Image (tube, rainbow, N blue to C red):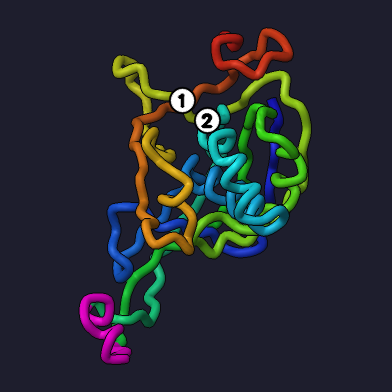
Amino acid sequence: MLKATYTLSNLFSLKRYQDGHLNCRSFHYITAYAVRSAILGTIIQLDGKAKAKELFPYVKNALLFVQAPDETVGNMNKIKRTTNRFYTNGVARGEYAMTIGVREYVDMDKVTIYMDNTIPNLELYLKNIDHWGESDGVCSLTELTKADALENVLVPWDKESDVEIYEQYDWAKKMTFEDVYMFSDNVIRKQERTLNMINPVIHLNNNSNHVEKVTV
């Protein structure tokens, strides 16, 4: 399994899905949805739409773990944004009414993900990711290695442990390429929400990429 670590060149902001554009809290960690979308976007950028469509099932089904950051600090900032009315009826008339919104920015040193190496040319695509989703998190790869263990990763909550719970979002099982391709007439966000907890260490038994081959 590959471990990829990225540094951020500025403050990170990835809007929580349930928030409106005028009141945007941010996730304090990367989402699986954003990671898969970034990889697909890089495939399109480097190899074109046809190759991205071909590799879409690989990206969708690849095993992916997100490392929880050691520490983050969030700060809400007032910013000038278009009003909600602009999105409902102002676009057609060219109205650009403005108002003040609030957006959360997070001070975050790095983003680390673990991913099985089942996507053709995955290392090339990981090296060329330069931002995360619809965020201001411009990033650059600083480490790409083969991992013997997964450290501080988000895993599904067992519904029994008394631990801090983290929301995680990933592509829905019914997601298609046309759903996520930004220039598609049928583009729509389809995500699945899970409740996660932090697992300090997951040791890999061998070189297999399969989740059945890991022990806690």
Considering only order in the chain, which callout, 1 or 2, is on the residue closer to the N terminus? 2
Could you tell me residue 67's position as x and y percent? 56, 35
Amino acid under disc 1: Val
Callout 2: few (<14), some (14-19), or many (20+) C-alpha neighbours within 10 Å? some
> Which is closer to the viewer, label 2 or label 1?
2
Foreground of the two, 67 or 129: 129
Q: In this view, does 108 lie above or below 202?
A: below
For residue 82, which quarter of the picture? bottom left
Residue beneath the point at 61% across and 26% down: 151
Which structural element holds mark 2?
helix
Read off the magenta span. 85-97
Which structural element holds mark 1?
strand
Callout 1: few (<14), some (14-19), or many (20+) C-alpha neighbours within 10 Å? some
| Residue pointed to by mark 1 | 155
Amino acid under disc 2: Asn
**Where does the N terminus fall, quadrant-wise?**
top right
- Is residue 137 in sight in this rendering? yes
| Residue pointed to by mark 2 | 61
